Amino acid sequence: MFAEAMLTNVRQVKSFFDQLDEELSKVNQFYTAKEEEFVERGDILNKQLQILLDLKQLLHDRKESGSSRSLSLNSRSSSARQSDFSESGDDLSGKLESQTEEVITALARNGVNFVGSEAARKKGRTRSTSMRIDIPATTPTRTISAMTSMLWEDLANSPKKEGPGDSINKKKIQSAEKMIRGAFVELYRGLSLLKTYSSLNMVAFTKIVKKFDKVANQEASSSYLKIVKRSHFISSDKVVKLMDEVECIFTKHFTSNDRKKAMKFLRPQEHKESHMVTFFVGLFTGCFVALFFVYAILAHLSEKLSPVTGTTYVETVYPVFSMFALLSLHLFMYGCNLFMWKRKRINYNFIFEFQPNTALKYRDAFLICTSLMSAVVGALVIHLILRSNGFSAGQVDAIPGVLLLIFIAILICPFNIFYRSTRYCFIRVMRNIVFSPLYKVLMVDFFMADQLTSQIPLLRHMESTMCYFLAGRFRIHQYDTCKSGTLYRELAYVVSFAPYYWRAMQCGRRWVDEHHPDHLANMGKYVSAMVAAGARITYSTNPSTLWFIIVLVTSLEATVYQLYWDFVKDWGVLNPKSNNPWLRDDLILKNKSIYYVSIAFNVVLRVAWVETVLNFRVGLVESRLLEFLLASLEVIRRGHWNFYRIENEHLNNVGKFRAVKTVPLPFRETESDG
C-alpha cells in the first residue's frame, strides 16, 4: 500500500510538472513570436524614418538654393494620396547637383533608387525602385484633397511635361512624419506590454511552484525557477534594448531632444479621478431633482400642461427642451456603459482608439449629463415663472434659444475648458459621419452613427426648433407653420432618412475597402429601416388602409432584419452549438439569465413602432408625453445594446486579439524598368 501511494504521488508530481512545462513552452513560443514581430517592425520603422529624414534634407536643400524645380509625384490611387517620386540630376548644376546626389545616394542605401541619378548610372542598373508616399484617406479632408489634386493634374498639366503630378510639399512630409511618429508610439506600447507579459508570467510561475512546495511538502521551487529564468522570455534582452532605442530615436527626431515631452507621448498617464467630479455629480443631481419637482408644481398650478390652455406652451416649448432631455439621457446611458465596461475590464479605449489620457471617464459623462439637465430644468422653471407673472411671450420664449446658443458656444469653444478633447472628438466624428462615403470608416464612426439611428426624434425636435427660430414663430406662436408646411414635411423625410443613409454609406465604404459580404448585408438592414421610416411618416399624414398595410409589412420586415443582426452579428448570441445554450461560448457576465432577459427586452423595445400605427386617441399633451416616453425607451434600448456590442467586439473581433493597433506606414517601394 505504501509503495502504491508513493507511485501515485510520483505520477501526480510528474503530471504536474509536465503540465507546467507545457505552459512554459506556450509562454516562450508566444513571447518569441511577438519579440520577432516587434524587432522586424522596429527595423522597418528605422528604414522609414531614414527615408523621411533624407527627404526633408533634400527639400531643405532645394529651398535654400531657391530652385523652382520640384520633386514629381505621380498619382496612383483615387482613394488615398499615393504618389511615386522620381528625380533626375541632369537639370541641376554645381553645388545643388552635388547635394542632391548625396541625398539620393543615401536614399539608395535604403533601397530607393532614382532613374537618371549618378548612383544608378554607376551601378548600371536597368531596373529602378521608386518610392510611393501613401497617406491613407482617413478623413474627408484628405480624400477631397486627393480627388481635387487628381482633377487639377488632369486639367492643368500639359502633355509636354513628364506626367501629371504635384510637388512633395511640407504638408505631405508632415503627414508622413505624423504616421511614422504614431507607429513608433504604438511600437513602444507593444514592447511595454510584452515586457509586462514577461514579468507577470515570471511572478505566476514563482507563485505556482511555491504553492506546490507548500502543498506537496517538497523543495522543487528553487530548481524549477532556475529553468524558468533561463527561458527565452526572461533571459532575452531584445525588448529592453529596443525600448531604449525607440526612446532615444523618438526623443531626438520627434521632440527635439526633450525627453519629458517624449515620455508624454510614449507613456501617456491617465488623469486621476478627482473627488471634485464626484462632488459636482452629486450636487447637480440634487439640483436637477429639486428643480424638477419645482417645475412640476408650478406647471400644475399655472395649468400650462392642461389640454385646454396648454396647447401653445406644449407646441413651442416641448421640442426644445425634449431635445436636451433626450441628449442628457443618452449621455447618462453612455456613462453607465463606461462604468460597466471598466468594471468588466473591457478595453473600450483600444476598441474606439481613444487616447487614455484624454478619454472620457464614466464620472465625467455623469457630470456632463447632470449639469446639462440642471441647466435645462432651471431654464424651464425660469421660463414658466416669467410667463406666469405676465411677461409677454415674445420676451420669455427667447430663453430656449439663448440656452441652445450657450450650449453650441460651449461645444465649439476653442479654449481648453469643458472637456475640449472630447468636444472636438465629437465634432470630428460627426463630420466623418456626414461624409461617410469619402473615407475609411473607423470603429468610433459607425458606433456613433448607430447612436444617431436611435436619436431620430431628437433630430426631428431639432428641425422643429430651427423652424421656430428661423421663422420667428416663437414671437407670433403660429406653430402650425412648423407642423403642416410643405417644406417642413419634406424635411421630415430627410431628417428621418439621414442617420440610416449615413450608416448605409458607411457599410458600402467598408465593403469597398474590405470586400466582405457582411457589409452589404448590413447595408440592406439600414435600407429596409429607411423604407419603413418613410412609410410611417407618409402614413402619419395620409392614414389610409393601403398605407397601413405598407407600414405593417415594411416595419415587420425591418424589425426582423434588425433583431437578427442585433443578436447574431452584433451580440454574437443565438448560437445553437454554443457551450452556453443559445448564447456565446465566452461570456463576461457570470449570470447567464441576464443575457436571456436582455434578448427579450431588446425584442420588446424594437417593436415600439406599433404605437405609431395604432394611433391612440389621446390629447395633445398626452400624445407629446407618450412620444417622449417612446423616444426615451429607444435611447435606453440603444444604451443597453451598446454594452453587448462592445462586449462581443472585445471577446471576438477587435484587432484580431491584438493589444496595440497597427499604424500604416507612408513609404512603400515599387519596382519598374529603367
Image (spheres, grey):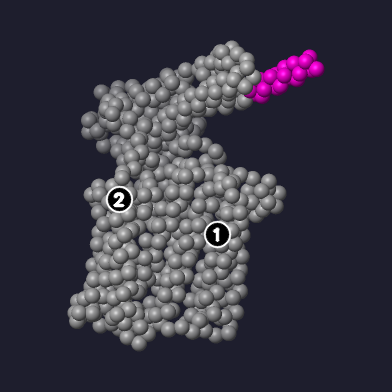
Q: Which comes before the other along the chain, label 1 or label 2?
A: 2
Compared with residue 416, is residue 192 higher up or lower down, i.e. above or below?
above
Task: Tell me where residue 168 appears, x and y as whole percent.
Answer: 34, 38
What amino acid is labelled 1 in the image?
Met
Viewer-proximal residue among 325 and 489: 325
Q: Which SS class for mark 2?
A: helix
Q: How far, Cα to Cα, is label 1 from label 2?
A: 45 Å
Q: Which residue is nearer to you in this view: 178 or 195?
A: 195
- Comparing 196 with 174, the one in front is 196
- Which is the main secondary structure of the residues drawn in magenta? helix
Report which residue position mark 2 lands on.
279
* Looking at the image, residue 626 lies above or below residue 374: below
How would you rate the neighbour count of disc 1 (Cα within 10 Å): few for under 14, some for 14-19, many for 20 or more?
many
Count neighbours of disc 2 (C-alpha within 10 A) and say few if under 14, some if 14 to 19, many if 20 or more: few
Q: Which residues are magenta?
A: 1-22
| Viewer-side label of 1, 2 | 2
- The amino acid on which the numbered mark 2 sits, given as a three-letter code, is Phe
Q: From the viewer's perspective, is residue 610 above or below residue 372?
A: below
Q: Position of residue 268 (x, y in %)?
A: 35, 35
The residue lying at 36 percent from left, 25 percent from top is: 247
At 29% from the left edge and 23% from the top edge, which residue is drawn? 99
Q: Disc 1 marks which residue?
A: 523
Image x and y of residue 596, in percent: 61, 56
Specify whether residue 14 is painted magenta: yes
